[in-house]
Image: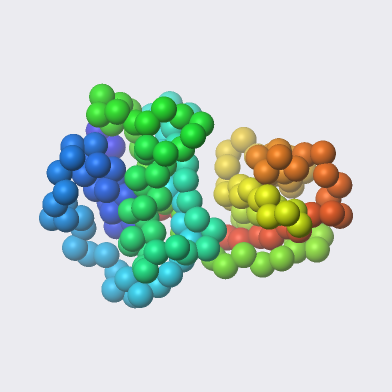
Amino acid sequence: MYQPQSVYTKVAWAAILRELTGEKSNNDFPKDFPNETLSDKRGCFVSLHKTDGSLRGCIGTIEPTESDLKQEIIRNAISACFHDTRFDPVVPGEIDDIEISVDVLTEPEEIFSFDDLDPLIYGVIVCDKSGRRAVLLPSIPSIDTVERQIEIVKRKAGLGHINDNKLKFYRFTSNRYH
């Protein structure tokens, strides 16, 4: 069974296990969560992968919505496990075949040239004037060019048919924890 390596993934894993078992005790959450992050409000993504590497769920927030990073991770872990509309909810029998990662995001900054992107370093956000947007995390193994990164994020937002100069693009970095 998967063993989380970082305190961030330990929190996410504990939240998922707590929801799967129905036990509502907080005793299973790590006590060593860094104090500075308890007051830190950051966006984050929790990704679930099968042991073969295929995606099983991924939900996150670009901007923080919770009181601190720990609560943000808990919320996104539960959402990735049970509310990613691309997948059926995770069931207890699958838990031995799931691994997780947590990406903690920096604040996005608008870019005006794709020369300011590198898919290994930067994630990208695209949005249009009506508020449709999508995000793509950095360092995804199958995405090795900026052109591919832009193509995918636009498609995710349903904006693949819109000219780039009619859209806004933002970049961010993230620290990924396993």
Question: Please, is residue 92 above or below residue 178 in the view?
Answer: above
> Residue 29, position in %: x, y?
20, 55
The residue drawn where x is 62% and y is 53% is 123
Q: Which colour scheme is used?
A: rainbow
Asked whether residue 153 appears in the rendered view, the answer is yes
Residue 153 position (above or below residue 43): above
Q: Nearer the viewer, residue 151 or 90?
A: 90
Q: Which residue is drawn at 82% across and 39% down?
A: 161
Asked whether residue 119 is in view, the answer is no
**Residue at x 57%, y 60% (from the top left corner):** 173
Q: Is residue 144 left or right of residue 55?
A: right
Of 46 and 161, which appears nearest the observer? 161
Residue 17 quadrant: top left
Q: In this view, does 139 lie to the left or right of 100?
A: right
Q: Vertically, is 127 above or below 100? A: below
In which quadrant of the rendered view does residue 145 lie? Answer: top right
